Image (cartoon, grey):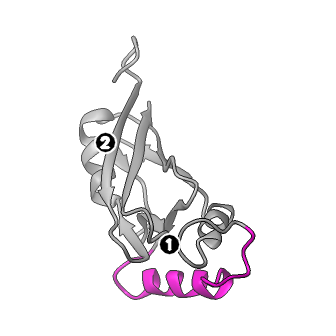
Amino acid sequence: MADTYGTFRTHVLDIATGSSETVYDLTHDCEAFLREAAAGRDGLLNVFVPHATAGVAVLETGSGSDDDLLSALHDLLPADDRWRHRHGSRGHGRDHVLPALVPPHATLPVIGGRLELGTWQSVCLVDTNRDNPDRQVRLTFLG
C-alpha cells in the first residue's frame, strides 16, 4: 500500500514460530521488502509485532547470541507460577512481560534503499510464547 506520494509502504509477514521459544531472523524478509518499497531511496524501516507476547530485537545471530538471549530471558522471566497473569500454559504470564524488555518494535535507517545494519546485526522476532505458534510482523517503509 502506498500513499499518494509513494513515500509510505507497508507489508505484513505471517511467521510460524512453532511451539518452542524462538529468535526468528527477519533480516532477509526486511531486505526483500525494501528492494521494492524503498527502491533506492533513503528513509526508515519500522518493524512492528502486533502481539502482547512478542518483541523485536537487533542482535547477532548464528553464533549463540540468539540462544543466549533466550537463556537470559528465561533467567529474568522464569516460566513458573509467580505470575499474576495466569491464563494459558504454566508461566505464560512472563510472556506478557516480555515486551517491556524486548519492545514490539524497532525503527532502523535505510540508506540508498538498503537496511543500514552493523556487520553482525540482524533484525529478529523474539517469541517466548509457546501457546501462539503463528505471528504477524508489519514492515513499514517511510521514505
Amino acid beneath label 1 = Thr
The disc placed on residue 85 is none
**Residue 64, percent from left and from top:** 41, 88
**Residue 6, percent from left and from top:** 36, 19
**Residue 136, percent from left and from top:** 39, 49
Rounded to the nearest angstrom, the CA distance separating label 2 from label 1 is 27 Å
- Can you identify the residue that label 2 sits on? 34
Image mark count: 2
Residue at position x 37%, y 87% in the image: 63
Please report the bounds of the magenta region as a residue range: 60-84
The answer, for residue 39, to whether it is visible in the render is no
Residue at position x 49%, y 69% in the image: 129
The disc placed on residue 128 is 1
- Position of the N terminus, as image quadrant, is top left
State whether residue 2 is above or below residue 17.
above
| Sequence-wise first label, 2 or 1 | 2
Amino acid beneath label 2 = Leu
Does residue 70 belong to the magenta stretch? Answer: yes
Q: Quadrant of residue 12?
A: top left
Residue at position x 28%, y 53% in the image: 29
Q: Residues within 10 Å of mark 2 (few under 14, many from 20)?
A: many
Q: Nearer the viewer, residue 136 or 60?
A: 136
